[in-house]
Image (cartoon, helix red, strand yellow):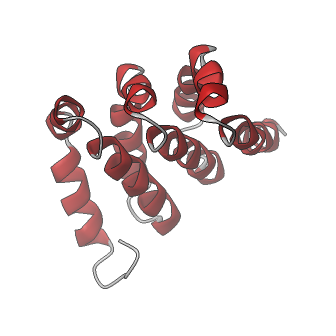
Amino acid sequence: GEKDIQVNALKGLLNLVAGSDAQTQQVVSAGFVAAIIQSMRMHEGEKDIQVEALRRLANVASRSEAQAQEVINAGGVAAIIHSMEVHEGEKDIQVNALKGLLNLVAGSDAQTQQVVSAGFVAAIIQSMRMHEGEKDI
């Protein structure tokens, strides 16, 4: 069904952002991040789609400050935190969301401030509370 198509499309997008920074920037400039966030919004209750989308956003956010800024500008922080809230009991979602957020705060001071202002600290604390004792969180 549509869910399988979305999951497979998101998995396929990994190959597009796994190349050089220049290749990744071309994909990001073509609307990659906005498409991922739109998929997350349209399928917010679908764990598999959320996990794959979060993995892609974490990957883009880890590449360069410019690409991390693309994630921030597209509303990626809010989308990541929303996914964490909707799926607060899902470890896979929490782990991948936290990777993305941590990649975003590893950027410039301005990026760190944007992520913190969007609710980063509260999201991490809530995740830690919900998954107390789990080593990955």
Above or below, 45 against 127 in this view is above
Q: Return the x and y of residue 26 as percentages of the image width and height.
A: 64, 19
| Residue depicted at 37% across the width and 56% down the height | 98
Above or below, 102 against 39 in this view is below
In this rendering, position of residue 53 left or right of residue 123: right
Q: Quadrant of the N terminus?
A: top right
Q: State whether residue 55 appears in this view.
A: yes
User: Residue 119 lies in what quarter of the image?
Assistant: top left
Q: Residue furthest bottom?
A: 133
| Residue depicted at 67% across the width and 43% down the height | 18
Q: Residue furthest top?
A: 30
Above or below, 46 against 39 in this view is below
Report the number of discs.
Answer: 0
| Residue depicted at 27% across the width and 44% down the height | 105
Q: State whether residue 35 appears in this view.
A: no
Q: Return the x and y of residue 133 as percentages of the image width and height.
A: 30, 85
User: Residue 36 lies in what quarter of the image?
Assistant: top right
Q: Return the x and y of residue 38 as percentages of the image width and height.
A: 56, 24
Above or below, 25 against 100 in this view is above
Q: Residue furthest right?
A: 1
Q: Return the x and y of residue 96 as percentages of the image width and height.
A: 48, 56
| Residue depicted at 29% across the width and 70% down the height | 130
In this rendering, position of residue 96 left or right of residue 30: left
Which sits in the foreground, 97 or 26?
26
